[in-house]
Structures are given as C-alpha cells and as structure tokens.
Amino acid sequence: MKLKKPYVLFLGDVEDDLAAKVAFGIADWRKEDCVGQIQLEGCQTSLDIPKLSLDEAQNMGAKTLIVGVANRGGGISETWHSTLIQAAEMGFDIASGLHQLLISVPRLEEVAHKNNIILHEARIPKGSFPIASAIPRSGRRLLTVGTDCSVGKMYTALAIERELKTREINVDFRATGQTGILINGEGVPIDAVVSDFISGAIEQLCPENDDNHWDIIEGQGSLFHPSFAGVSLGLIHGAQPTDLVLCHEPTRTHMRGLPDMPLPEILECIQSNLEAAYLVNKDAKFSGIAVNSSLISELERFALFDKLKEASGLIVFDPMILGIEEFVDDLLGKAC
C-alpha cells in the first residue's frame, strides 16, 4: 500500500483515545509524515500535532487523509460523510482500515473517480492464502500476545523491531492490523481473512528464513477475549513462534467492551498462550512481559514490575517509558 505523503489524520468524533488508536499509532511512529489532525464536533481526544481544517491541511501539502479510527465494530459514522466527500472533492486520497468500506459512503466512490483520487482499504486482504501446514520452519519469530485487546501489542512489536535494527540485526516487522499496515506499508489484515485461512496467511506473511533473522509479529486480540479469541488463536498457530511477549495494561478492570468479563491472571494467560503455541512449536517460550504503565504512578510501576518478575521469572518492561534495552539483551543472549 503506497500512500502519498504527507498525511492528515482524521479523528472524526471519537469518544476516547482507544477509538483513535490508528491515529495515535501513525502520529507516534510516523510523525514526520503527518501535517496535522482533523476533528469533528464532540471529539474527545487529541494528538500532539496541529489541529487543522481540510483547507489548512491542503495548504500544508497533505496528500492523503487517513481515517485514524478503530472503533468497536469498525463502522463509518454518518457524521463523517460530508468531510470524507469534501476531502475527495479537494483531491485528497483517503485511506481507512475500518471493516466498513469507504465505498459504502454514498457518492464517495463517484467523487473519487471524478477527481482521480485513490480510496485505500487497509482492511481488504490482498491475494489468496493457503491452508496452514504447520511444517517446522527456520528463523526466529517473536509474537506479541495480550491479556486484552488494545494493550500495546503493536507498540511493543515496533519498539522491539526498532531496537533490533539499531543493533544491525536482520529483522522485519510483520503487520497484522490496520494501524500496523498503514505504518508499515504492507501486511495482512488478519481479522478480515476467512477463518480457515488465518494461520496460512500468517505462515505466508512470515515464511522460513535464515536462522539469525527475526520476524516481529504484531499480535491481535486476546485468547481470553470472547469477541476476538479466534483471530488470536489462528495468529499463534500461523506464527509458529519461537518467542512470545505478553502485553498487559494494569488498570483494566474488565475486557474492553465487556464489563462483565474480568481479565485473566497473568500466569494463567501465559500458560494458555504457551499451550496454544506448543501445537506448532514444542520449543516456544515466553521471553518477557510488556506493561503499558502510562496510567500508574512510578511507585506503582516498580512495585508491579517486581511482583510480575517474581511470579513469572521473566523480564518485565515498559517499551515506551523505560525502554527495552535490557529485554533485547536478554532476548538475543538466549537466542544464541
């Protein structure tokens, strides 16, 4: 997916930070490509980039409007229609990773064709995928998994990839969700793949490689989230991981969107993911626990890290606040 740069990120009228995680991800990892953000009335979050109108974004050179929303259900609100149509009339390409396609917006496809602009759909799988074979394959593959959805699996994977690159390690980030694909420029929107082919699609995304090559695979959902566990399981089986990292957000009191569904215990989550991974790789192991500790105090952070390290025997880290050097040192040391 070759998007014209620079971008303007569209937040619509989202109700919280999590619903705008696509925009946050692109702004955090590709800020140099973003001229600003566009918000509608009622928007409850904001990025650390300028707030713009469409006219202002065009004057600053923006070429592509990216829908930076990942709302529950992946729908396009009717309140966004006029802005999307106006953007197309002004000559912006438009990119989206929502389940509901841009072409479903009345008149948008017609306007796009008339103005010779491209509607990029990051949620449509490209090409065909095989049935998984589970044949053992060479190379190192690290998969991020979670206690819940939206707990930092993509951020952790990107941080690990970046640190490995600084050490001149042969590494690729493998995107499996719309934000990762929009950041990376390629990948497989795994939750849009027909269920029988999820594992095969991931085998194809990260095939056999040199023994010293690392694929850092973006995880999706959680084995413990009833809404998304099917995708999580298929991803584990297709990844055939040599290493796993558990991602956790400690302030959650229940699964996202399911107030009556509590989060699993950390050790229970580790064991369940390992049992799933053992089906395709008996040597799979957890290499660390990545904690999104941005919403707790420094004192709470270190107390939690000590508790998790003692219980699991794993390195515990926050890739965005405290860095990942110690984790990567350990990861590479054990891989030798």
Image: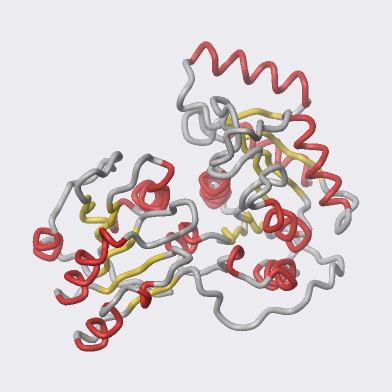
| Residue 157 pos. (x, y %) | 57, 48
Q: Residue at x 48, y 61 (%)?
A: 178
**On the rendered image, what quadrant is the N terminus found in?**
bottom left
Q: Is residue 85 left or right of residue 275?
A: left
Q: Is residue 298 left or right of residue 17?
A: right
Report the label total.
0
Q: 238 or 213, which is in the foreground?
A: 238
Q: Is residue 146 left or right of residue 132?
A: left
In this rendering, the answer to whether 312 lies above or below 36 is above
In this rendering, the answer to whether 137 lies above or below 324 is below
| Residue 185 pos. (x, y %) | 45, 68
Q: 274 or 30, which is in the foreground?
A: 274
Q: Quadrant of residue 84?
A: bottom left
| Residue 311 pos. (x, y %) | 77, 21
Q: Residue at x 46, y 27 (%)?
A: 294
Q: Residue at x 69, y 67 (%)?
A: 202
In this rendering, the answer to whether 315 lies above or below 66 is above
Q: 253 or 325, which is in the foreground?
A: 253
| Residue 187 pos. (x, y %) | 55, 68
Q: Residue at x 66, y 32 (%)?
A: 263
Q: Is residue 181 left or right of residue 115?
A: right
Q: 331 or 299, which is in the foreground?
A: 299
Colouring convention used in this rendered image of the protein: secondary structure
